[in-house]
C-alpha cells in the first residue's frame, strides 16, 4: 500500500495550469492532443476511484477532447483528489476489483492507477511546457509495474514497444522508456 496523493496533487496542479491554447497541442501519446489526454485523465480518475471502492463501472477509457468538461481545471483535479482519497482506504488494496473492463487484484489496480497518474502527468507536463517531478518511492513503484510488462503485452493498449534508454539514465527516463515513451520527446 502506498499513498497516491503526492502524484495526484502534482497532476492536478498541471491540469489547473493548462491554457485554452494548449488543448490542441500534441502529446507524447501519439493519438492524443492535450484535450484528449485531459479527458482520458478525467475518465481514469473515475474508473480507478470506483476500482478502489469495488464498485463496478463498465465502459472503456475515454480520450476525446469533445467530452472534456468545460470546468476541467476544477473538475479533473477534484476527481484526482477523490481517487487518491479512495486509495487511502486499506480495503482498496484487498481482494479483487475491476478497472477498464479488466478484473485484477486491488494491489495491482493501485499500481496501475499510480502508473497512469505519473505517466500522464509527465505527458501533460511535456506537452504544455511545465516542469515535472515525482517522488522517488512512487517512481520505484511505477518502475516495478512497467518492468513487469513483457514484450508480448506491449500491443499499444497499455504500453507500446519499450524505447531504448541508457541503463545509467535517471529512473524517470528508464520508466518512460519501459512505458514506450521517448524521454527526449519535444
Image (cartoon, rainbow, N blue to C red):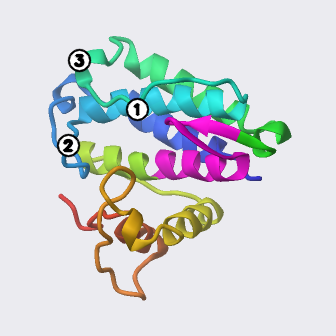
> The magenta stretch spans which residues?
97-118
Q: If you read the primary sequence from the N terminus, does the residue marked by circle 2 or circle 3 appear first?
A: 2
The quadrant in which the C terminus is found is: bottom left
Q: Secondary structure at mark 3?
A: helix
Residue 184 picture quarter:
bottom left
Say few, some or many: other residues with alpha carbon within 10 Å of mark 3 (under 14 / 14 to 19 / 20 or more): few
Q: Is residue 17 visible?
A: no
Residue 183 against residue 118 in the figure, above or below: below
The dot on residue 31 is 2
* Residue 105 forms part of the magenta stretch: yes
Q: Position of residue 117 (x, y in %)?
A: 50, 45
Say few, some or many: other residues with alpha carbon within 10 Å of mark 2 (under 14 / 14 to 19 / 20 or more): few
- 93 or 166, which is in the foreground? 93
Q: If you read the primary sequence from the N terminus, does the residue marked by circle 1 or circle 3 appear first?
A: 1
Separation of residues labelled 1 and 3 (CA atoms): 14 Å
Residue 15 picture quarter:
top left
Q: Is residue 75 visible?
A: yes
- The residue under the point 62% across, 59% down is 138
- 151 or 163, which is in the foreground? 151
Question: In the image, 175: left or right of 28?
Answer: right
Q: If you read the primary sequence from the N terminus, does the residue marked by circle 2 or circle 1 appear first?
A: 2
Residue 55 against residue 168 in the figure, above or below: above
Find out whether the residues at labels 2 and 1 contact each other: C-beta distance under 8 Å. Answer: no
Q: Position of residue 70 (x, y in %)?
A: 33, 11
- The residue under the point 41% across, 87% down is 167
- Seen as rendered, the residue at the extreme top is 70
Query: Which residue bears the numbered disc 1?
Result: 61
Residue 120 against residue 22 in the figure, above or below: below
Query: Which residue bears the numbered disc 3?
Result: 66
Amino acid at each position: 500500500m502506498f499513498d497516491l496523493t503526492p502524484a495526484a496533487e502534482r497532476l492536478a496542479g498541471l491540469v489547473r495550469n493548462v491554457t485554452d491554447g494548449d488543448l490542441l497541442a500534441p502529446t507524447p501519446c501519439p493519438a492524443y492532443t492535450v484535450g484528449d489526454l485531459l479527458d482520458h485523465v478525467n475518465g481514469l480518475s473515475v474508473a480507478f476511484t470506483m476500482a478502489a471502492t469495488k464498485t463496478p463501472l463498465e465502459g472503456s477509457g475515454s480520450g476525446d477532447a469533445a467530452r472534456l468538461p468545460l470546468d476541467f481545471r476544477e473538475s479533473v483535479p477534484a476527481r484526482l483528489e477523490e481517487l487518491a482519497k479512495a486509495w487511502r482506504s486499506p480495503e482498496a488494496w484487498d481482494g479483487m476489483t475491476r478497472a477498464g473492463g479488466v478484473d485484477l487484484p486491488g494491489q495491482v489496480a493501485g499500481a496501475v492507477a499510480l502508473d497512469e497518474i505519473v505517466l500522464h502527468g509527465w505527458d501533460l507536463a511535456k506537452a504544455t511546457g511545465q516542469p515535472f517531478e515525482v517522488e522517488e518511492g512512487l517512481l520505484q513503484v511505477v518502475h516495478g509495474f512497467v518492468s513487469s510488462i513483457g514484450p508480448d503485452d506491449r500491443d499499444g493498449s497499455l504500453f507500446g514497444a519499450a524505447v531504448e534508454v541508457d541503463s545509467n539514465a535517471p529512473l524517470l527516463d528508464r520508466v518512460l522508456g519501459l512505458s514506450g515513451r521517448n524521454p527526449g520527446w519535444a
